[in-house]
Amino acid sequence: MLSAPAASLPCPPPGTRALGELVLEARLQGRLWRGSSLGQATDPTLASGFPALDAELPGGGWPLRAVTELLTPQAGVLEWRLLAPALRGWWAGQALPATPTPGRKPRTATPALRPLLLINPPHTPHLPGLQALGLPPSALVWVSAATPAQALWAAEQAIKSHVAVLAWLPEARPEQIRRLQVGALGSDAPAFLVRPERASQQSSAAPLRLAVRPGEAWALDVHLLKRRGPAHEGWLALPAVPGAVAPLLTAARRKPQPAPAPLPLPTPAPPPTERTDALARPVLHA
């Protein structure tokens, strides 16, 4: 005696997709990326303050769960103008007042800003100049390391403590950068490493590496050496005029530049004349 056939699940109509596939695609959205397109990072990012740069950065800004390498020809000059807009936005987000809870008196105290550790800067931080860039001096902590090993240890401990880091590590080795990158995966604060241009020849675990050079008219020329996505071609010219210098440059640009005066025509040499000095007199023979 034959048993009744087991009930089979209905097959989806041709041309349709199963519900499980749609759910899996939704979960993987943002975690998979094509090599020919920028990665859409699921981790939070921080807007750089330069729209042209954000358009080239995966996720539209600086990553907050990764270290970013800035390679410059001279440390202590260009990195402040590049990072100041993003840091201002990071601290502005912390200073926003909390949403008042019904039935509770709103707090009037200003919340303490999360610090930014300046580890092993090549020059003594100039607080008035940093304040002119919009950076709060009370949130800046200067860490002076006696040796490269101490600077690396301070950067690693700060990243593990979810503290924002701007570290100058010219002698860091690839395995040390990898250790910092592993620690940054669990942090929600930006971490920037400033290194010399020659470090571009070394391998690095940092997912984002940029070369920064001075441009014309106070601009910054930026080239993305490494990012999640296609290779970046050419250089970006970012307007990075300091706030105190911008009014002076604007006033100078408003003044019409005088046309250069034409070069004077060469004066023709006078025709030779007969010499009358003693050396030109004929010799008299006796």
Image (tube, rainbow, N blue to C red):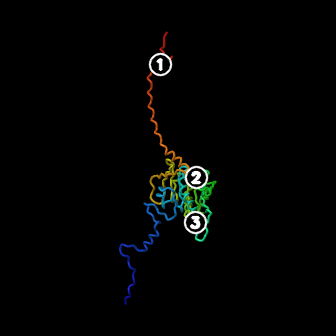
Viewer can see residue 149: no
Disc 3 to disc 1, how far (Cα)?
A: 98 Å
Q: Residue 127 at x, y = what percent?
A: 61, 52
Q: Is residue 104 left or right of residue 234?
A: right
Locate residue 134: give its quadrant: bottom right
Numbered disc 2: secondary structure:
helix
Q: Residue 155 at x, y = what percent?
A: 59, 59
For label 3, the residue is 98
Which mark identifies residue 275? Answer: 1
For label 2, the residue is 132
Contact between labelled residues 1 and 3, with CB atoms less than 8 Å apart: no
Q: Residue 153 at x, y = what percent?
A: 61, 59
Sequence-earlier tag: 2 or 1: 2
Which mark identifies residue 75? Answer: none
Marker count (numbered): 3
**Residue at 52% over, 55% down:** 202
Q: Nearer the viewer, mark 3 or mark 2?
A: 3
Disc 3 to disc 2, how far (Cα)?
A: 27 Å
